[in-house]
Image (spheres, grey):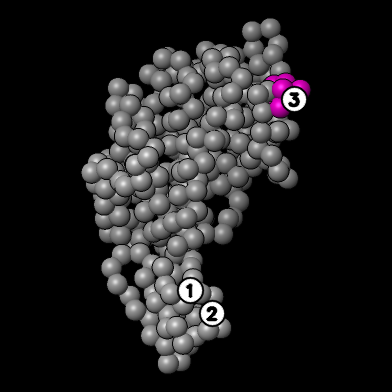
Amino acid sequence: MQFELSEDQHLVQKTARDFATAEVLPKAAEIDREHRHPAELVARMAELGFLGIAVPDQWGGAGMDHVSYVVAMEEISRACASTGVIMSVNNSLACDPIHRFGTDAQKRAMLPAVAGGKNILTAALAEEGLRDPLAPATRARREASTWKLDGAKAYVINADRAERFVVFAQVDAALGWSGVGAFIVDKNTPGVTVLERSTTLGLDAASFGGLELKVLHTPGHTPGSVCLYDQAGTLFSGDTLFEGGPGATAFRFGDFEVIIRSISEQLLVLPGETAVRTGHGPSTTIGAEAPHLPAWIRRGW
């Protein structure tokens, strides 16, 4: 098993690190404070290929692998959580399910624009009080040639900017995870209501909002808009969330590094101790003469 990054993966990491340091980090506090969608940073991520890293180039993506996605995700998230989560959702919950489970018509209609940053497609997955994302209260019921969706979604990233939503809904509760379907819903579909955005600590530039659904959703209602449940089979929803796990972990790890570095550098250096900063990333070393601190902090990381 190969644990070292390849030459291409190192290049992606360096590109992401340089971009994050020079362009994302200087704006992170400002866009969070102003609750402003970082349109200019999203456009730059599209130019760099970061909005569809694992999407094949034939569908408008960068044609890289998921390791490249993870190392880029970590670098961006270290600089700005909001920019990182926008990138994460665009890759894992927007591009990935359509690439893996969509029809060729869906891919042609949506992937080039979404991976290229021209259109925003986001996931409507979470619900208020929902502990298991694959046991949603939102229901989908087939009525003749249409699907009727009823429910409400919460914490939808870019809800006020998205042109379409990948909506997760319960089709057959008896099948557990396999009974959850996904539907591509245009925001202008009658019965779709975007709710007021909510405030989220450290993620206010990502524009979280809610979604109400009382929809008769007909496959083909809009170009490329069909039910992914029909095309994907029973493993669509579970596979999508598992596939998104590495990206979500990289996002959190990037944030975690910043938090721990801040604690170790600003709060845990006692009088007489020395904080040494070297190179990129977390690098504070606190002297071994501080036995009251945990060993992993005293030895640095």
Q: Amino acid at mark 3?
A: Ala
In the picture of the structure, the residue carrying the numbered disc 2 is 293
Locate residue 190: give its quadrant: top right
Pick the front one: 118 or 101: 101
Could you tell which of marks 3 and 1 lies nearer the N-terminus? 3
Inter-mark Cα distance, 1 to 2: 7 Å
* Residue sitting farthest toward the top: 144
Residue 83 numbered tag: none
Q: Is 118 left, or right, of 138 in this rendering?
A: left
Q: Amino acid at mark 1?
A: Ile
Within 10 Å of disc 2 (Cα), the crowding (few <14, some 14-19, many 20+) is some
Q: Amino acid at mark 2?
A: Leu
> Picture coordinates of residue 36 (x, y %)?
45, 53
Locate residue 228: give its quadrant: top right
> Picture coordinates of residue 43 (x, y %)?
32, 43
Inter-mark Cα distance, 3 to 1: 47 Å
Inter-mark Cα distance, 2 to 3: 49 Å
Q: Quadrant of the N terminus?
A: top left
**Residue range of the region highlighted in magenta in the rendering:** 170-176
Residue 173 numbered tag: 3
Residue at 53 percent of width and 84 percent of height? 291
In the picture of the structure, the residue carrying the numbered disc 1 is 297
Residue at 49 percent of width and 27 percent of height? 97
